[in-house]
Amino acid sequence: GAGVSQTPSNKVTEKGKYVELRCDPISGHTALYWYRQSLGQGPEFLIYFQGTGAADDSGLPNDRFFAVRPEGSVSTLKIQRTERGDSAVYLCASSLGFGGLAGVGTQYFGPGTRLTVL
Amino acid sequence: TQLLEQSPQFLSIQEGENLTVYCNSSSVFSSLQWYRQEPGEGPVLLVTVVTGGEVKKLKRLTFQFGDARKDSSLHITAAQPGDTGLYLCAGVNFGNEKLTFGTGTRLTIIP
């Protein structure tokens, strides 16, 4: 079956513009995650959805960042008034949810969207 | 804030050599995962270790979780060019779905 897909693969925008990044999770996965990976670093958690609701949005850096998952499948990460510091690869992952003793279900990552803010 | 430091940050060795990558934290985790990431792709899960002192083997890769569940190591025997990539550890807290990733080790195996 298809894995997690993300569109666009690359996005170049100008400082101050609005951008939307899309994530299509694996069919049937109820949990969806967004991470941000800056150059040379490990991914950093942004937000986690269980179904349609944001279960944990503690990683969103400020109120310019917002994410939705209206039907419990596709998710969109929205960034307003982009800044050069927002440049990074934005990764999406999905899982079946709770992982028992391991504490987390296996997360399957998409290839990411590389955002460049000029 | 929980931090995971990986060492070394970069490692370049000849094919056939052995190597060890370390993942250290001052915090306790319920479990720890290791991922490998290749350019233009997302991280791919290699293993999850849950119990303090646990050792798991995946072919030439050996993963160990520290007794206190604060640190982990990845040992590769007889490295091959296909092992090249960014290796990431990630800590998990029970009841919390988010992953706390380490700083990463970029490994290059020279043929």
Image: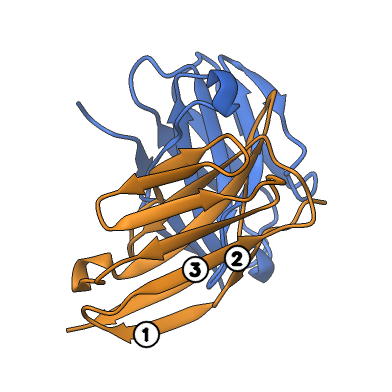
Where does the image place residue A46, in percent across and percent down from the top left?
A: 66, 43
User: Which quarter of the rendered picture does the C terminus of chain A lie within?
Assistant: bottom right
Comparing B76 with A4, the one in front is B76
Chain bearing tag 2 is B
Distance between the alpha carbons at the discs numbered 2 and 1:
17 Å
Q: Which residue is mark 1?
A: B12
- Residue B73 in sight: yes
In the rendered structure, find residue B21 and report the number of the disc placed on it: 3
Q: Secondary structure at mark 1?
A: strand
Q: Secondary structure at mark 2?
A: loop
Mark whose residue sits in front, 2 or 1? 1
Task: Name the residue located 34 percent from the left edge and 35 percent from the top edge.
Answer: A4
Judge from the rendering whether residue B78 lies leftward or rightward of residue A60; answer left or right. left
Q: Secondary structure at mark 3?
A: strand
Q: Is residue A107 above or below residue B10?
A: above
Amino acid beneath label 1? Ser
Q: Is residue B94 above or below residue A62?
A: above
Mark whose residue sits in front, 3 or 1? 3
| Colour of the chain lettered B | orange
Where does the image place residue B1, in percent across and percent down from the top left?
A: 83, 51
Q: Earlier in the sequence, mark 3 or mark 1?
A: 1
Comparing A45 with A74, the one in front is A45
Residues marked 3 and 1, same chain: yes
In the rendered structure, find residue B103 and report the number of the disc placed on it: 2
Judge from the rendering whether residue A84 lies leftward or rightward of residue A58; answer left or right. left
| Colour of the chain lettered A | blue
